[in-house]
Image (cartoon, grey):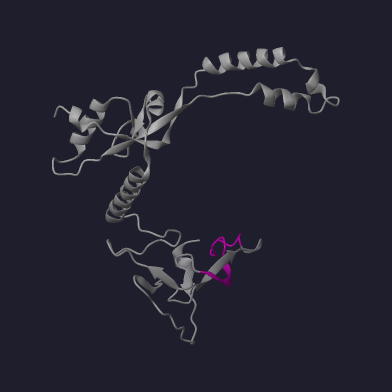
Amino acid sequence: MSNSDIKPVDITVKLHKDLHGNEEICPTCNGVGLVIANNSYGLEDSTNNNHLPTFPYKHQSLRFCSDCYNGVVHRCEYCGEIIPRHRTKCNCEKQREIDFIELQNKENEKLMKAFEAPQEVLEKSSLFYSEDYGYDDGYFSDWEDFFECWYENHSVDDPRPEYVWATEPYKMSISADSIIERATEDLYEDAISDISDEKFDELQEFLNNWCENSGVKTTYYQSKYKVKIPWEEDEH
C-alpha cells in the first residue's frame, strides 16, 4: 500500500500529548496514532470496463500508524531526521560514532576488572583478542602485528590500551556416549549396558580422529583473563 493511499484520521477531539526530549507529533497521523487505509478491490463485471481501473472500489478502514507509537515520533538530536518506528536510535554517522565509543568504554571497563592471565592460560593462548585490532575479527598472534595496526589507525597522542584478552581454543568434538545412548534408547531395556567399555573407547577414538581430520578449524573465544600489552617491546 503506497503512502498516497494513507490519510490521517480527521477527528474534532483534541488529544493531549506531553512531549519530552526529542519527541514530536507524528506528521503522518497528526498525533492520532491511526490512519485511514484505502482497501481497494474490484468486481468481476467491472474489470472488463476499459474506462475503469482494475480495482475501482474502496473499503476504507482505520489502522495503527506505521510511522509512530501512539502518535509520537522521535527526532535524532544529531542529524535532525525522524527515527524510524522500529528503531530506538538513529543510524546516522554521529550516532554510530557515539555507540562505538560507548562499546569501547564498556570493553575497557571489562578488561580493567578482569584477572591477569596465569602462566598456564598464557601457554594455551596462541591468539589474543582486542577491539583495537582491525583485522581477522580482532584476533592476532603476533604483538608486532598489533603494534602496526595501532599506529596505522591512531595518532601518537591517542591513549594506548593496557590490556588485550587471552583466548581459549575450542575444537569440534563428538561424544561416543551420546551417540550410543541415542542409538540404544529404543532397543530392549538396558541394551547400552551390553556394550563394553572397549567398544565405547573404540568409537570415541574413531570420532576423535574424524574430527581432527574433518577440515573444521579450531575456534578461539575470549577467556575471562586479560594480558598486559608489552609496549616496552614496541620498536616504533
Query: Which quadrant holds residue 43?
Result: bottom right
Q: Is residue 167 above or below residue 193?
A: below
Boundaries of the magenta span? 47-64
User: Is 218 one of the magenta-colored residues?
Assistant: no
Position of 56 with respect to 130 (left or right) is right
What residue appears at the point 66 percent right and 63 percent down from the top-left corner?
Answer: 45
What residue appears at the point 60 percent right and 60 percent down from the top-left corner?
Answer: 47
Q: Position of residue 65 (x, y in %)?
A: 49, 68
What residue appears at the point 27 percent right and 55 percent down from the top-left corner?
Answer: 94
User: Is 53 one of the magenta-colored residues?
Assistant: yes
Q: Position of residue 39 (x, y in %)?
A: 57, 66
Q: Position of residue 40 (x, y in %)?
A: 57, 65
Q: Is residue 21 above or below residue 111?
A: below
Which one is nearer the viewer's eye here, 29 or 114? 114
Q: Is residue 13 above or below residue 90?
A: below
Position of 164 with respect to 148 (left or right) is right
What residue appears at the point 53 percent right and 69 percent down from the top-left corner?
Answer: 64
Query: Which quadrant holds residue 49?
Result: bottom right
Position of 217 with respect to 232 (left or right) is right
Q: Position of residue 50 (x, y in %)?
A: 55, 61
Query: Which quadrant holds residue 120?
Result: top left
